[in-house]
Image (spheres, rainbow, N blue to C red):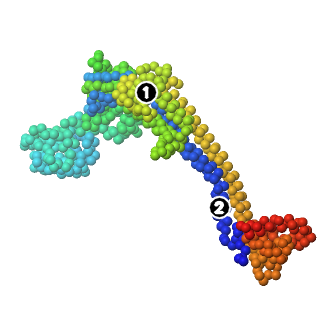
Amino acid sequence: MAAIQISGLLSNQAFDWKTVVSELIAADSIPITNLQAEQTTNTSQVTALSSLQTDMTSLQTSVENLQTGDLFAARTVTSSNSNSTWKSTSADGAALGTYNFSIQTLATQAQTEGAVGVSSGLSATSNVSGLTLANMNIATPITAGTFTVNGQQVTIATTDSLQDVFNKISTATGGDVTGSYTPSPTDGITLTSRSGAEVILGANNDTSNFISAMKLQNNTTSTTSSSAPLGTVVTSAAIASADLNTPLTGLDGSGNGSITINGVVINYNANTDTLSTLLSRINNSNAGVTVSYDSANNRFNVTNNNTGDVGMGLSDTSGNLLAAMGLTSASGGSFVHGKNAQFTINNGPPLTSLSNTLDSSVTGISGFSVTVNSETAETLQIQSNTASMQTAIQSMITAYNQVQTDITTDTKITSSGGTTTASVLSGNNEVTDWASNLQSMAFDSVTGVIGSIQSLNDMGIGFTDTTGQLSITDSTKLANALTNTPQDVQNFFLTGSTGFVSRMYTGLTNDLGANSSAQGTLAQANTDLASRITALQAQLSTEQTNLTNSFITMLDAQSTAQSESTTLTNAFLNPNNNNNSCWVARAVYGAGNPRWLVFRFWLLKESPAWFRWLYLRHGERFASWLDDKPRVRHAIRRWMDKRVARVLHP
């Protein structure tokens, strides 16, 4: 008879219980996987809503920008002269129109021209042997080098005296040309040819500026003299030492004096203030004039800071400085009237302005001014700033279309090859309602608006086919509206609570609130799902631990069962075992009845494992117990007969 084989966990074959545990846990993890998938869907929807929220916010900002500053009141000015140097400005809301400006006279500044030659001469006498070139107070300092007289070069240094130069001229010309200096009021030099020949000055290769600095010119005669006095005022020296030709008088013992210009008193000290300091003091005062020194003509000039035919008041308050500067009428100063600008607009009557900046006070054009600088005619057109308006409107259209595109993409359902694919927000009626709301707010006419523009369509803006996208459908219509009726456009967009901007902004605020609420709901749902997932994962962890422990216990039991199976085999099948008997069957059938052997065959081949366990452990004692219980033996025999019959008659 073959050895006893224990099936199931008691077999000798390996049992991969870890795989079983993993498969059981995987099966029980399906609810977690489903919850995680739900989380992923919620997260995708939050991402889509967040992106949509960003685009809706951009749209709201672009709508709000339509009321930034004075967008619809801004003006531009263009000239008929593309090379115009006139400077035009227009305030927001300036009157629209075309204006032809014809300038007959530009405004000029009034000034007092001082007397010429207010400085002392180069020398008090004709003796200039001690007057070096470097120390002469002249308009243009002399440079060292060569100059030419009658074709002969004369070389000079700035350390030469003026007399040294005269001597070098004489030597170079063989004594023919002589030089001399005449003191003030002439204050100039003369070159004379003794032979009566023409004195010819200069050459192309001269390197010294002596001839021009001395104000000498060729005149086709034998004599040439300085064209104007040579001396200049020393503005960097103290006033008392500035080489003014007229002595200063009327100062106090410390040299203090004062002058009055246009009612503003200017104080000075002749011993400590330089002429440059005094001029700066005057120019920085409230006198409204600029005083300058003209070294070329050796005179002072006083010029009004503003243009126009307005007067000027100059007087010595204490001292005679203005007289010494040649600025009083008694000392040779003369007042030159300024001019007013004279012009016409659109061939109208002559107009006058003190300034060359022609503003609304003289033109009558509200919010407009132009600064002219030429006596010409130009046509100026004041227009709406259509470029900035159209840019702002286009930005709104672009932002609007982006929102609608996102909603369409996120909610569409597509079908291809029999497969239907939903988008991340498909079936979200609230999101599709936002698209519908935007279309209504953009398309419907506004109420309570004055003017020709009652809807976007009235300015050439409409929807493209059935896509829900806005576009400029009639650019000419839009250009006309922005150019000719900017106030009506402004009324449409900005009228109170009923205008386009207010209506769209409020609607977007509501939709953005709903968007944030939807994101919050999804975020809370994910938080709740996370809690459920955590709880289920804890349960699975416990389940996995229990299963593992159970299988380990079963493995231990398997080891024990295998050991006992060996014992059972030895007990029933080992021919050398004296206990090789089936106790209960022998007790029921008797040792001489072979049916107990048939029952033993059933026991080893067909009986359940649990039954064999019981039989092995308790059969011998149970057989002893049956010795005095015939009725029980009879009942057990009937049960055993059925098992024997199965073996004998399968």
The answer to whether residue 408 is seen in the rendering is: yes
Residue at image x 79%, y 81%? 577
Viewer-side residue, 113 vs 582: 582
Q: Which residue is mark 2?
A: 22
Q: Amino acid at mark 2?
A: Ser
The answer to whether residue 130 is seen in the rendering is: no
Residue at image x 25%, y 26%? 376
The label shown at residue 456 is 1
**Is 241 positioned to the left or the right of 543 in the image?**
left
* Residue 573 higher or lower than 436, as above or below: below
Q: Amino acid at mark 1?
A: Leu
The residues tagged by marks 2 and 1 sit, at their Cα atoms, a distance apart of 66 Å
- Point out residue 548 in the picture as x, y percentages from the top left corner: 71, 63
- Point out residue 92 in the picture as x, y percentages from the top left corner: 42, 27
Residues packed near mark 1 inside 10 Å, few (<14), some (14 to 19) or many (20 plus): many
- Point out residue 591 in the picture as x, y percentages from the top left corner: 84, 76
N-term mark: 2 or 1? 2
Element type where label 2 sits in the image: helix
The part of the image, by quadrant, that contains residue 104 is top left
Residue at image x 7%, y 41%? 196
- Point out residue 537 in the picture as x, y percentages from the top left corner: 67, 55
Residue at image x 20%, y 42%? 212
**Is 640 positioned to the left or the right of 142 in the image?**
right
Element type where label 1 sits in the image: helix
**Is 207 positioned to the left or the right of 411 in the image?**
left
